[in-house]
Image (cartoon, helix red, strand yellow):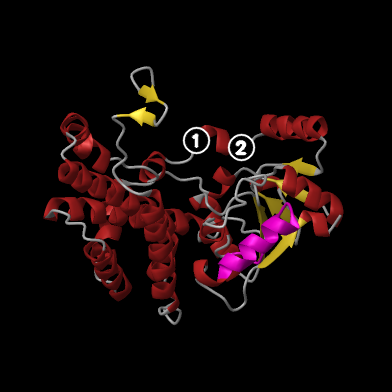
């Protein structure tokens, strides 16, 4: 910032390679097109296609980052901004190779999101419950009865207010309790091999290739292979995490509350709960930051759930308007609830 030159006309010698309005249109269009794509596969309820639908939310973020880099490179070279271009191009390969969310899947869940199942952990959870006094009973999943109680994997202001209104008993459980195992590399290689033969996967790869072509972005063979390799590994890890939920010893809630379906592990659990005939309620955790006509919040947060609880009637209106173009399953549509309407 100290090196920028300012004048009455703005910043001198400043160049931004891509137009923000064009970028917003690309994002909006590709989200809508993938929604249409997956709606056309609504008859396919195979595990791989369901998880491909989950992966799409995260993979588009990766694919769009590649689009930004390649579009910027193209514009830098076209405008001949030599000094900036040289610096940008020297970092291009590092930018393209960033693993983003995939790194979290490889690393696994942190110790902080797993609770202590021993007596000491039970005591600590009891003390936290008393000190916090927010209506939630902290408990390791092992000690939670599964007879219809609410199990919540993330609190927050919206969840606390909603719980106070419902006056039900709710257990606050760490999401890591549902995913106790480490993933072996051998399982990843096996999953990748099996994924590539699925018809929905092949069609999706063709769709992604067409996306770049339609936006006049030329990816090298290596760049496209690296991008698809990212998707392959994401799907392979996701399959293993879902296997953990399917284990007979896992205790799947009948009523799940969670603070974000944009977190992969919450999303997978929500899918499993609904497959078992349970109910999923997701709580807005953005506190009004998505009051925006270009919001993509429903695409990220309103998939695979029954009810989405937000803070105000204005947010409710914005989200409901976006559901038609941003969620995969319209029948039935998620119920959007505003806390201001239930007080």
Q: Farthest residue toward the front? A: 8
Q: Any magenta on residue 67? A: no
Crowd tier of the residue under label 1, counting other residues whose Cα lies within 10 Å: few below 14, some 14–19, many 20 or above: few
Number of numbered tags placed on the structure image? 2
Tell me, yes or no, whether the two marked residues, 1 and 2, touch with CB atoms within 8 Å: no
Q: Give residue 293's quadrant in the image.
A: bottom right
Q: Could you tell me residue 210's position as x and y percent?
A: 24, 67
Q: Secondary structure at mark 1?
A: loop
Q: Nearer the viewer, residue 340 or 105?
A: 340
Q: Which mark is residue 110?
A: 1
Residue at left 42%, top 65%? 53
The magenta segment is 305-323
Q: Nearer the viewer, residue 230 or 40?
A: 40
Residue 226 seen in render: yes
Residue at left 73%, top 61%? 337
Of callouts 1 and 2, which one flags the residue occurring earlier in the amino acid sequence?
Answer: 1
The answer to whether 183 appears left or right of 161 in the picture is left
Q: Which residue is mark 2?
A: 115
């Amino acid at each position: 910032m100290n090196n920028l030159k300012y004048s009455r006309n703005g910043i001198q010698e400043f160049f931004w390679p891509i137009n923000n309005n064009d970028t917003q249109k690309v994002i909006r269009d590709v989200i809508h097109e993938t929604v249409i794509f997956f709606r056309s596969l609504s008859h396919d309820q195979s595990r791989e296609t369901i998880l491909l639908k989950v992966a799409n939310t995260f993979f588009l973020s990766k694919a769009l980052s590649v689009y930004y880099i390649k579009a910027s490179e193209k514009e830098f070279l076209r405008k001949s901004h030599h000094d900036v271009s040289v610096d940008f191009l020297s970092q291009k390969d590092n930018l393209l190779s960033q693993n983003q969310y995939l790194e979290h899947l490889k690393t696994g869940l942190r110790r902080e999101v797993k609770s202590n199942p021993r007596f000491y952990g039970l005591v600590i959870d009891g003390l936290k419950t008393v000190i916090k006094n927010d209506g939630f009973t902290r408990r390791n999943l092992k000690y939670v009865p599964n007879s219809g109680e609410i199990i919540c994997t993330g609190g927050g202001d919206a969840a606390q207010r909603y719980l106070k209104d419902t006056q039900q008993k709710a257990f606050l459980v760490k999401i890591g309790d549902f995913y106790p195992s480490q993933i072996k590399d051998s399982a990843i290689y096996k999953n990748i091999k099996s994924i590539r033969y699925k018809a929905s996967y092949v069609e999706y790869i063709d769709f992604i290739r067409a996306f770049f072509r339609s936006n006049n972005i030329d990816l090298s063979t290596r760049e496209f292979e690296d991008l698809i390799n990212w998707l392959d590994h994401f799907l392979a890890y996701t399959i293993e995490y879902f296997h953990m939920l399917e284990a007979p010893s896992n205790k799947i809630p009948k009523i799940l509350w969670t603070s974000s379906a944009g977190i992969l592990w919450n999303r997978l659990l929500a899918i499993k709960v609904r497959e078992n005939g349970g109910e999923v309620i997701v709580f807005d955790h953005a506190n009004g930051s998505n009051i925006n006509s270009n919001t993509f919040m429903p695409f990220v947060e309103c998939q695979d759930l029954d009810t989405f609880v937000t803070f105000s009637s204005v947010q409710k209106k914005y989200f409901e308007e976006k559901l038609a173009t941003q969620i995969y399953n319209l029948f039935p549509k998620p119920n959007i609830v505003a806390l201001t309407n239930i007080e």
